[in-house]
Structure formats: structure tokens, C-alpha cells
Image (tube, rainbow, N blue to C red):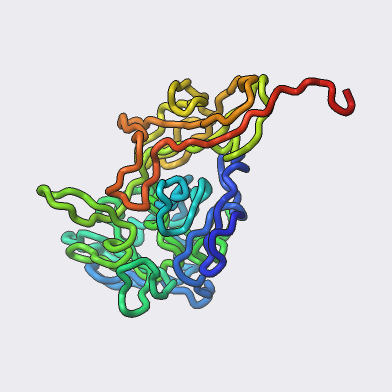
């Protein structure tokens, strides 16, 4: 793992090691705002309250007794690839590895809400984690706060959202939300609240710090900029190999390899440029389209014989016709970095065959 911060734990997946469809738990990126809370399954309880017919509490074993569902979903930190913004901005300097694809096991959130009797006029569902502290990003609240995010009613009641307790067939690791977390396929990772302890239905709009001050963007409403919460992931592709500043031998084929993903749609087209975006060629998908999961891809590059610096780029299009933008949208601030950015590599001269052993 690439260490971005030790406390709280913020580790990045070494994206140049991308190989398998599912990211191993030991390599899945970790994004934490506060110290990892110490929870155990014996005393754990998930409270459901607010705009419901009856408030409920679920113990860990009771959640495990409910009908289980499995979902493969890609999670990406909204600040992934921040290091590619020019000029440099504040925040964790994620490169390519704040993203991963895993199989999550749990119970449908809808099932939990149905047992509590969600009120007909409930508009949003708020999710609280057990992690608590004082944010570093201004403007900061005066006192320590819990990590909390909300979902609109429609998304919360969709079939894909899980109250999850397993990751790739194993109990959730501590840094990934043990014993229970939320998984919101198609949304940026901040929506998938870890160490989930409370589900609170509300009538109205949630205005919490992580919904308005942080993990938000500027949206124009009636000609005025207003803050809106980040939600669905934008279509994006990344090159895993070659890695930045890698030296590749000239005059021979090289397999350019990467992955692409989006929100609720599916990625339908992937293209690669080896000349800084001057020209593009179609790449080959290695995975069948699967909603909410990434697709790996490859493209054979006939590396030029001429030594020098080359810029490789990738761009994708989803089933809704959305393409990656040519440049970063400033309304998103330091988030949603999904424009095609250059991976710079150096081509060495072709092997002459007269070195040692020849």
C-alpha cells in the first residue's frame, strides 16, 4: 500500500499492480477521517429511528440472520487522482489508487427500513458512523462531530444498497468498517458510511458537515451557485501500466492495461492515446459489462524506436452517452477528477543485442 497518512489511516492501492477483477482486501484503499473506532460484534447495535413507524435496534447476529445479498461494486474516493490537478491543491494527494472493486455481502437497506416502517413522507435517510473527531477542512465545526451522510429516499430504497458485513467473502476488516458498513453502489466512496451505528429517517434535507461543507460541489440553481452534495460517480478510466515515469523499451509491443468505471450506467467504450491526445484508438475490454463494477481493458502499443518522453491517456464513454470531459470542472473543487490526464513514460532505445550474454 502507498501511505498517504498514517493517522488517521489513509492508504492507497498501488494501481500499477492492478490484475484481478476483484481487489484483494489487503490492497483495497483506505480512506478515514478520524481514528478507527474499536467496535465488537458482541456489543454492536444498529439503531433505526426518526420518521419510522417504530424505532428498532439490530444486533450483529440479527443482521446476519436476515436474507443475505451479494453485490460487486467499485468504490472510488471523490478525491482520487487529486495529484494530477494543476496547480497543486490541498487535500490528500491521491494518485490513481483511491479506488477498488469488491464483492460485498449484507442485507438490503430497503429490508431494514421496511421492518421499521419508513414513513411515507420521509425524504432522506441519514447514516451515522461510530468514527468521531474534528474535521481539518475549513470551515470547521466548533466541536467534534460524527461522520454522517444521507441518501435520497429513492436511492435508499433501491435494490442495490446494502448494510454490509462482509468484503470479498470475509468479515469486514477494521479499517473498512467492521463490523457493519453501508455500501452504496454507483456513488463515490464517502456515501458508503463505515462503522455504521445509526440509520435516521428525516422529513426534509440533511445539512450535515459532510453533506454541505465537505464532499459537496457548486451547482447553479436559478442562476445562483448553491452547494449540492456529491453523489454518483462520473465516468472515468485510468492507466495502470505503464506507470508514471516508467521506462519502456523502444521498438516492440507493450500491453497498456487499465480499468474504467462510472455510476449507475455501464462503460461501453474505451479509447487510448499514446501521443498526448492527438489521436485515439479503441481498446479491448477484458470484462463483460456489469452494473456498478469496473471493466478492465488492454491495448497493444507498438512502442516507437525513437527514445524520448511520451504521454499516454485513456478516455471512456458510458451507456448514457457521457464522455470524460477534456478538462477538470472547477465547480467540483478538488473532487471528481475524471478528465483524461497524461501518464508520462520514457522510451529507451531498442535493444542492440550486443550487451552481456549476447
Q: State the residue at coordinates (45%, 62%).
A: 181
Measuring from the top left, give residue 210's x and y in whole percent. Answer: 33, 64
Q: How many marks?
A: 0
The spot of residue 221 in percent (x, y) is 14, 49
**Residue 271 occupies which quadrant of the picture?**
top left
Residue at 31% from the left image edge and 53% from the top image edge: 230
Q: Is residue 282 visible?
A: yes
Q: Residue furthest right?
A: 357
Q: What quarter of the picture does the N terminus occupy?
A: bottom right
Residue at 45%, 67% (x, y): give it: 195
Residue 163 drawn above or below residue 143:
above
- In this rendering, the answer to whether 354 lies above or below 19 is above
User: In the image shown, does 157 or 291 lie closer to the viewer?
Assistant: 291
Q: Is residue 273 left or right of residue 262?
A: right
Task: Please give the name of the residue rendered at 43% of the width and 72% of the height, measured from the top-left corner.
Answer: 130
Residue 140 left/right relative to 70:
left
Would residue 164 appear left or right of 348 to someone viewing this image?
left
Residue 75 appears in the picture as rendered: no
- Image quadrant in which the C terminus is located: top right
Residue 247 at x, y percent in the picture: 65, 34
Front-lying residue, 249 or 58: 249
The residue sitting at the bottom extreme is: 143
Residue in front for this viewpoint, 312 or 193:
312
- Quarter-of-image position of residue 289: top left
Amino acid at each position: 500500500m502507498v501511505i498517504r497518512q498514517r493517522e488517521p489511516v489513509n492508504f492507497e492501492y498501488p494501481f500499477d499492480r492492478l490484475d484481478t477483477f476483484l481487489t484483494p482486501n489487503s490492497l483495497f484503499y483506505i480512506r478515514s477521517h478520524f481514528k478507527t473506532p474499536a467496535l465488537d460484534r458482541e456489543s454492536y447495535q444498529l439503531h433505526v429511528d426518526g420518521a419510522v413507524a417504530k424505532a428498532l435496534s439490530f444486533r450483529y447476529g440479527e443482521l446476519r440472520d436476515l436474507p443475505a445479498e451479494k453485490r460487486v461494486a467499485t468504490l472510488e474516493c471523490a478525491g482520487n487522482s487529486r495529484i494530477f490537478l494543476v496547480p497543486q491543491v490541498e487535500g490528500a494527494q491521491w494518485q490513481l489508487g483511491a479506488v477498488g472493486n469488491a464483492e460485498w455481502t449484507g442485507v438490503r437497506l430497503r429490508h431494514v427500513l421496511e421492518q421499521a416502517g419508513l414513513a411515507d413522507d420521509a425524504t432522506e435517510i441519514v447514516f451515522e458512523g461510530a468514527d468521531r473527531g474534528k474535521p481539518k477542512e475549513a470551515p470547521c465545526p466548533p466541536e467534534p462531530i460524527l461522520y454522517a451522510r444521507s441518501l435520497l429516499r429513492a436511492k435508499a430504497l433501491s435494490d442495490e444498497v446494502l448494510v454490509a458485513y462482509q468484503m470479498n467473502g470475509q468479515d469486514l476488516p477494521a479499517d473498512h468498517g467492521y463490523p457493519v458498513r453501508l455500501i452504496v453502489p454507483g456513488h463515490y466512496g464517502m456515501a458508503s458510511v463505515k462503522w455504521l451505528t445509526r440509520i435516521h429517517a428525516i422529513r426534509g434535507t440533511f445539512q450535515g458537515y459532510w453533506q454541505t461543507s465537505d464532499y459537496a460541489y457548486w451547482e447553479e440553481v436559478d442562476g445562483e451557485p448553491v452547494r449540492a452534495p456529491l453523489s454518483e460517480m462520473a465516468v472515468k478510466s485510468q492507466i495502470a501500466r505503464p506507470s508514471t515515469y516508467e521506462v519502456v523499451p523502444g521498438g516492440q509491443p507493450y500491453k497498456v492495461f487499465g480499468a474504467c468505471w462510472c455510476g449507475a450506467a455501464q462503460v461501453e467504450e474505451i479509447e487510448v492515446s499514446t501521443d498526448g491526445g492527438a489521436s485515439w484508438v479503441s481498446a479491448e475490454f477484458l470484462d463483460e459489462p456489469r452494473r456498478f463494477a469496473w471493466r478492465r481493458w488492454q491495448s497493444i502499443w507498438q512502442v516507437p524506436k525513437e527514445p524520448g518522453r511520451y504521454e499516454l491517456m485513456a478516455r471512456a464513454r458510458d451507456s448514457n452517452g457521457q464522455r470524460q470531459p477534456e478538462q477538470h470542472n472547477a465547480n467540483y473543487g478538488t473532487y471528481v477528477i475524471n478528465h483524461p490526464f497524461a501518464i508520462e513514460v520514457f522510451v529507451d532505445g531498442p535493444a542492440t543485442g550486443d550487451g552481456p550474454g549476447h
